[in-house]
Image: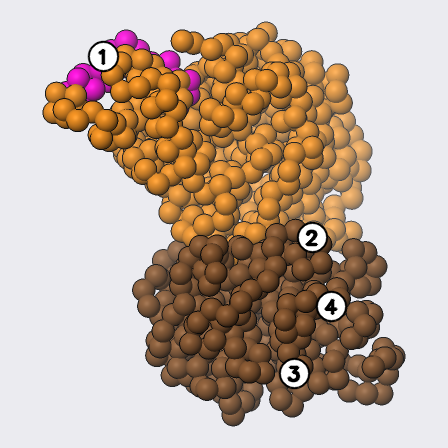
Amino acid sequence: MTINASKIQFDYKYTIGNQAVPPAEGFSGPVDVAIAENNELFVACSYYEYPPARKFIIKCNMDEDYLGYFGSYGEKEGQFIWPNSLAYNCNGSLYLSDEWLNRITVFDTNGNFMFKIDESGSGKGQLNKPAGLDFDPEGNLWICDSGNNRVQKFTSDGEYINSFGTKGNGPGMFNTPWGIKIDKMGNVFVADWRNSRVQKFNSQGVFIQEFGSKQGEGELNRPSGVAVDNDGLVYIVDWGNEVVKVFDQESNYLQTIKGDCHGFSKWAETRMASDPENMSLERAAVSDFTIEKIFFQPTNIEIDAFGRILIVDCGRHRIQVYEKSNI
Amino acid sequence: MNNPDIELMAHLFRRAGFGSNRGILEEYCGKGYEETVDELLNPADQPAFDDDLIWRYIPFFRMGTGAPGYQSYWMYRMISTKRQLEEKMTLFWHHVFATSYSKLNRNPQILKHLTMLRDNSLGNFRDILLEISRDPAMIFWLDNCDNHKGAPNENFGRELLELFSMGVGKDEESNYSEEDVKSAAKAFSGWTMAPQLPRYPYGDYNWEFEFRPDDHDDDEKLFLGEKGNFNGEDIIDIIVKQPATARFIARHLYNFFVADEPQVPAWQSTPPQDMEAIEMLEKEYYDSGYNIKSMMKLLLNSNFFKNSRFQRIKCPAEFVAGVMRLVEDYMEPKPDVHEIAYACAYMGQDLLNPPTVEGWHTGKEWIDSGSLVERINFASDQVSDLNKPGVKKIIARLSEQVGVTNNEELINQTLELIGPLTVEKSRKSELMRYLEEFDKNHSEKDTVFEQKIIGLLQLSVASREFQFA
């Protein structure tokens, strides 16, 4: 399907989050979001390492109701060091990758530890810096095994199925890949981070096409996350350029989303109300709010069942929500 | 057996960098000394630092609220960068333009400040002074944002002269007057930063430099004997011409890269220990048009530099980064680098948080009973970890080259591999006593060789000589 870029637009709707540490309502360096049932969200935060380490998973919903948090920094079961990606499995479990521990930890939606996949190495089913996670339509788990420059497929129980990819910059090769997304047809999109491109494969791992150019509007610089909407548009978090770039199915560049957060999230409103005088005085001196609106260190992207586009704005401790419309 | 080429190359990397392991030193010996100096002076020819990796795994280092993150980031950079002189120069300028996060409370700004120092580290001194005068971290640190037309704040103007460019005096003479300070302050009125959003709700934002003409004192000023409607840039143009500035920068470079000098406040009344070297650097300052890279090229290729081995006490940052390079840990992103950065602070150098705008007192003042214990414990802990790649390499090399029976050769080669380090005879005797005692208590020498070497390494890095660069 050919998309006319001038016929679509992406409208900023609202923001979820602000900078805060649990139990206060907010995020601290969110790196990924997983969308669960009933509009519930799980947000992996990767902030301080030094004591007190601040790493956790926040549970909230699309209406920005704060529902709690779980997890902590460490190497024990249920803990994590370098959380990278979260994926929700429709059986009611949540999978978290950890690039330092070479571990996938599986929680239930109340944050209880269920099991882990954590054999380190480069052999079949072994992991080295696992990053992006996603489930295919059959419920299998796909892992961007970034340190091994490959993609591995497991059952949701953690049984190895197969893999593809090796280090390099040719088709089907990777350099420290990050995000992964499986579309409804089972195609696999991989954010080939250090090759500054996104590659698309069929469900058998056969290379189909590449997204991103080395220069011009479609240039990608260290892409970290990918999403695909129901019309087949491909959304790529361009981590190095700190924007989201949208492509059609034929890899043609369409538009750039730079971030447009204006006004406050619900939690931010609460925060501002706690010290209205100082907050408003400092803000009153500022005339240009562009820097507050745009993304800073964006890491990932998800699209929910209603077509709402959630962009994880890591450096600003929030998620910006967009919707696509036809004009 | 002593290898003069390796010894000289090791000296170069201790001073122009943070040290290198034996394998790398041997590679550079093949390249040649002057060629290596040229490579160090041209950082763009070497692989760039992998900011992308560290910011992927530890995004906090870029965005973070909480300055220890920046200490950790910088320490990681000192340990792992392949552009050693560039990072060493950044540390040098931090010693000169000591700026602290403790007052800023806007922490990504300190990252921007460091980037500015690094980008200008081997540049023209006029440009460096101009950039530091326009740097929001410095403007806030020294209150130039409170320096207004008709209500001058002299803090920055005074330190610009006293600590950043000329010094109070030289050869028993004063370099400037109180009137010069007042004129400098007036010339920098209106040099401030644009208002910026508060930290909450969405995190820290950087300030940007802003010049406000309506808040700038444009009246005529008398400064160092020249008269005019000077602004800050004119003041810098006058400063860089001064013989006192040439002397000041030459002494700073000598103190940081060649041999410990008295503390800066004493420079007015204490002549340089090597006036000939200082005069060579002063001449190069003028001949090159105030170019720091040219001065460093002269310095690193000079005999006074080559002959200055182990005449400087390592500052804590050099010590910590050097030990980590020796054991080859944190060469790639890894959690808990703050523990390494904190070790530097425990030794008396809280990076990016100097005790005053004067920075740190150097040389012997780095050492007291507390800081010495911290140094010894830190180095000893690091070399005792058999999982560290650098420790494994040393043991493997000793095992191949020396075998397990010749204790004297074992001592010589160990000192060679951690330096080469030249120690007093009495120190060698102590090391020999340790080995003899060890052998007496361990009959199965092959199986305890690693343990024996670990003890030898621990004692060697605890030596007086290891504290020197």
Q: Position of residue A209 (x, y in %)?
A: 75, 66
Along the line of sight, the residue nearer the viewer: B269 or B250: B250
Mark 4 or 3: the one toward you:
4
Name the chain letter of the residue that bears numbered label 2. Answer: A
Please tell me whether residue A306 is drawn above or below residue B280 in the rendered image. below
Tag 1 secondary structure: helix
Residue A310 lies left or right of residue B373; in this view the side is: right
Which range is magenta? B418-437
Q: CA distance from mark 4 to mark 1?
A: 70 Å
Q: Which amino acid does the dot numbered 4 rest on?
A: Ile
Q: Which amino acid does the dot numbered 3 rest on?
A: Lys
Q: Colour of chain B?
A: orange
* Residue B207 visible in the shown view: no
Residue B321 lies left or right of residue B109; in this view the side is: left
Residue B136 lies left or right of residue A156; in this view the side is: right
Q: Which numbered dot is residue B429?
A: 1
Q: Quadrant of residue B177?
A: top right
Q: Colour of chain A?
A: brown
Q: CA distance from mark 1 to mark 2?
A: 57 Å
